């Protein structure tokens, strides 16, 4: 039976050694690296200082999470303040039949 990564099974006793390529790059990797293109100028990443990171962590730790009641109240307020739009507008055409019309045509 086969094994993962060249290692023996769980109850097989000794483990088989895992072989790694001796060369740092293989032929396919080397060709891909030669054909790669840089999309633009190099822009180095920026990091915050240790002190700033600790201060930000303390600020986030001190923040009180929103309770379920507060979240429900906020959702109710947002729903109440949202403009109410009609989903379907119906009007009668020249033959007297009901047809769906755009809301702007009312």
Image: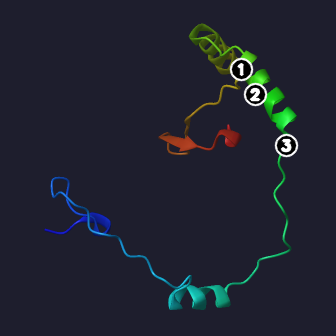
In the displayed structure, 37 sits above or below 69; it is below
Front one among 103 and 98: 103
Quarter occupied by residue 53: top right
Asked if disc 1 and disc 2 are in contact, CB closer than 8 Å, the reply is yes
At 81% across and 57% down in the image, what residue appears? 45
Of the residues under marks 3 and 2, which one precedes in the sequence? 3
| The C terminus, quarter of image | top right
In the displayed structure, 82 sits above or below 11; it is above
Residue assigned mark 2 = 57
Of the residues under marks 3 and 1, which one precedes in the sequence? 3
Assess disc 1: are there few (<14), some (14-19) or many (≥20) residues with their C-alpha within 10 Å of its C-alpha.
few
In terms of secondary structure, where does tag 1 sit?
Answer: helix
| The N terminus, quarter of image | bottom left
In the displayed structure, 73 sits above or below 42; it is above
**Alpha carbon distance from label 1 to label 2:** 6 Å
Residue assigned mark 3 = 48
Could you say where residue 54 lies in the image, as x and y percent from the top left?
80, 30
**Alpha carbon distance from label 3 to label 2:** 12 Å
Front one among 77 and 62: 62
At 32% across and 67% down in the image, what residue appears? 5
């Amino acid at each position: 039976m086969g094994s993962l990564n060249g290692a023996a099974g769980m109850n097989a006793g000794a483990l088989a050694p895992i072989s790694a390529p001796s060369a740092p790059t293989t032929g396919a990797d080397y060709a891909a690296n030669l054909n790669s293109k840089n999309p633009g100028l190099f822009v180095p990443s920026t990091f915050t200082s240790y002190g700033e990171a600790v201060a930000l962590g303390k600020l986030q730790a001190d923040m009180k999470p929103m309770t379920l009641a507060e979240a429900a109240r906020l959702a109710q307020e947002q729903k109440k303040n949202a403009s109410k739009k009609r989903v379907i507008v119906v009007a009668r055409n020249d033959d007297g039949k009901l047809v769906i019309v755009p809301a702007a045509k009312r």
